[in-house]
Amino acid sequence: MTPIPFLTLFLSTVAAPGPARAAQEPSTRTKAFVGARLVPVTGPVIENGVLVVRDGVILHVGAVDDTPIPASAEVRDVGGMVLIPGLVDTHSHVGNGWMGDGTEPILAQVRMLDALDARDAGIQRAQAGGITTANVMPGSGNLMSGQTLYVKFRDGRTIDDLLILDEEGTIAGGMKMANGTNSRRAAPFPGTRAKSAALVRERFLEAQAYRNKIAAGEEVERDLALEAIVELLEGKRVVHHHTHRHDDVLTVLRLAREFGFRVVLHHVSDAWKVAQEIAAAGVGSSIILVDSPGGKLEMQDIRMSNGAALEAAGAEVAFHTDDWITDSRHFLRLAGLAVRAGMSQQKALEALTIAPARMLDLDERIGSLEVGKDADFVLLDGDPLSAYTHVIETWVEGNRVFDRTDERDRLWAVGGRGAGQDWAPRCCGEGGTR
């Protein structure tokens, strides 16, 4: 029997009325943004800079005095503003996908692709927060709750408008896993931490055997779950692992060593306790900072200084919203909180941009202002780390997707859950329905 190919299946969502604007083609005009304070993240700050974009890609980045501006360019004076790369959220739940259910603890075969609502209001709120790329995840109630989806927050009507594809046309995404409290339930779920690890280990062993049979040319019945886990074994898909307590973190690192899968740790409430071990493993941590702790006993030791502790240990750090845990519109605030607790400003900015881009294997395209990268950027009216700063505009691949001066877009930025939804009886204290 011919070995079973590992295929990525594409799904188009049927168009229906919704709040998002019509899908846009990448801009074919050349635009030059002149006079802003440019923060490339991977290079020095340029106080009086120029960013030139063409066909959705960055063409030039530099100082006003020595950066060529094509004669055909539409020139925009953005003096007094701060221009930063588009923000990258490694852990979001916008789109109301969730997916994980109570049928079984390991659901490697289910896909966020089949669940995400491309017209969810959370996408507009994320744009209003300067987020241009996100890893949209299922929930953490399963040991393995399914395949995540890396998306660009373009203005679109269907899920296909948001997808990130590689050169082979494969849809970008990872795999959500979890341990600790969330995934411990009544049978068939595990009731203890030890059983949680044992179930994961058993399933990975099954995937190894499945892979070996296919490699040997043996006949096997196709198994979508095992196919997805084989992608983990072969490094084609990154594990994004929900974990809080220090002992749970070490269990994740132990399993990653045993089976050789790539992993990013998520939440990592006890990061300060095991920062050296995380750094030694060469594993990145996507952390969240909450200023009103509570809800889970395993989060009782979370500290604002987690970012500083991981930075001091030499480990890579990113922030995430876990939206709604942190509203996407307040993503920049996490970096400010981390700096207040001892993290360097440079690493805090990296943790919003290039560090998460690396964790998603997208750093060649996004995460910094560099020639040849996607023209994803944000215009701010002040310092990125200030609580008083507003996102004024958000651009994805050379297209403006958020403009605070536009009445409708401003409502996405300042309104409540119903903001911008025509069906909402009220949205944000004004009694309106916009």
Image (spheres, helix red, strand yellow):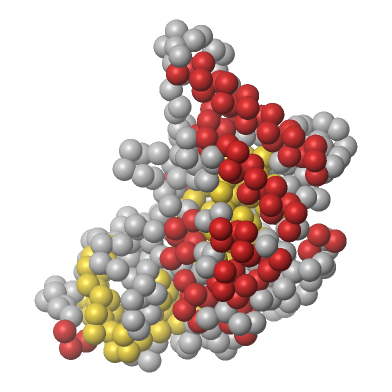
Quadrant occupied by the C terminus: bottom right
User: Could you say which is closer to the camera, residue 272 or residue 126?
Assistant: 272
Residue 59 rendering spot, x and y as whole percentages: 22, 68
The residue at 58%/37% (across/down) is 259
Residue 190 rendering spot, x and y as whole percentages: 82, 37
Residue 358 rendering spot, x and y as whole percentages: 44, 58
Determine whether, in the image, residue 425 is placed left or right of residue 116: right
Determine whether, in the image, residue 246 is placed left or right of residue 421: right
Quadrant occupied by the N terminus: top left
User: Could you say which is closer to the camera, residue 299 or residue 38?
Assistant: 299
420 is higher (above) or lower (below) than 104:
below
The residue at 59%/49% (across/down) is 240
User: Could you say which is closer to the camera, residue 18 or residue 173?
Assistant: 173
Q: Quadrant of residue 260?
A: top right
Determine whether, in the image, residue 144 is placed left or right of residue 30: right
As drawn, which residue projects farthest toward the left? 71
Does residue 417 appear anywhere in the picture? no
Q: Quadrant of residue 403?
A: bottom left
Residue 228 rendering spot, x and y as whole percentages: 55, 32
User: Could you say which is closer to the camera, residue 31 or residue 299?
Assistant: 299
The residue at 25%/75% (across/down) is 61
49 is higher (above) or lower (below) than 157:
below
